Image (cartoon, rainbow, N blue to C red):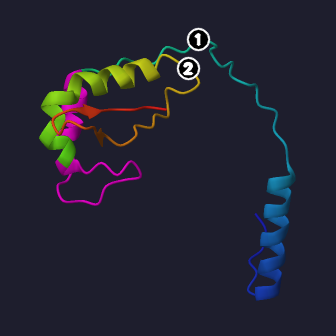
């Protein structure tokens, strides 16, 4: 153990020397092999229903512009389609961690809704 220093300049020199040596040092680390065929877990309807129920009401919508209130009001109608979309997107190992659902757009008939994913 070294001797204590009280000079601000000396303390700064010691700290700079310590962190310079720390970040310049190298320690060989073996790489963990990445599986080539990672299987994404299936999303179940009950999981989506629970997630939608837990969404806070009257919050501003996210980038997809779908409000929590809207999802709650139509979830019983579209839960199967949402589950299918999520599950089909998750079979691609490159994209299953990121899914974008675009807004539901109203068609000519007010009771019909179409969900588009890209």
Q: At 42% from the left edge and 18% from the top edge, which residue is drawn?
A: 88
Circles 2 and 1, Cβ within 8 Å, touching? The answer is yes
Give the vertical position of 77 relative to 41 (above or below): below
Query: What is the magenta range?
Result: 45-69
Give the secondary structure at mark 1.
loop
The label shown at residue 93 is 2
- Number of the label disc, if any, that sits on residue 37: 1
Residue 49 found in image quarter: top left
| Vertical placement of residue 117 versus 24, above or below | above
Q: Tell me, yes or no, if residue 96 can be seen here.
A: yes
Mark 2, secondary structure of its residue: loop
Rendered location of residue 103, percent (x, y): 35, 43
Work out whether residue 63 or residue 8 is closer to the camera in this orientation and state it.
63
State the residue in front, 56 or 28: 56
Q: Earlier in the sequence, mark 2 or mark 1?
A: 1
Residue sitting at 76 percent across and 25 percent down?
Answer: 30
How crowded pointer 1 is (Cα within 10 Å; few <14, some 14-19, many 20+) is rated as few
In reply to whether residue 54 is colored magenta, the answer given is: yes
Q: Is residue 50 magenta?
A: yes
Residue 47 spot, x, y in % from top left? 24, 28
Give the total of numbered labels. 2
Q: Please tell me whether mark 2 or mark 1 is closer to you in this view.
A: 2
x 33%, y 32%: residue: 115
Q: Callout 2: 10 Å neighbours few (<14), some, many (20+)? A: few
**109 or 67: nearer the eye?**
109
Residue found at the far top of this picture? 37
Residue at the spot 20% in from the left edge and 36% down from the top edge: 109
């Amino acid at each position: 153990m070294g001797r204590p220093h009280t000079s601000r300049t000396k303390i700064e020199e010691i700290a700079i020397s310590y962190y310079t040596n720390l970040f310049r040092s190298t320690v060989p680390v073996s790489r963990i092999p990445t599986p080539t065929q990672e299987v994404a877990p299936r999303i179940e309807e009950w999981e989506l229903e629970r997630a939608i129920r837990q969404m806070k009401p009257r919050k501003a919508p996210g980038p997809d512009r779908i409000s929590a209130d809207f999802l709650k009001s139509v979830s019983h109608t579209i839960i199967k389609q949402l589950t299918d979309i999520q599950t089909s997107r998750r079979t691609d190992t490159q994209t299953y961690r990121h899914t974008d659902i675009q807004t539901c757009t109203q068609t000519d008939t007010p009771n019909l809704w179409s969900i588009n994913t890209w």
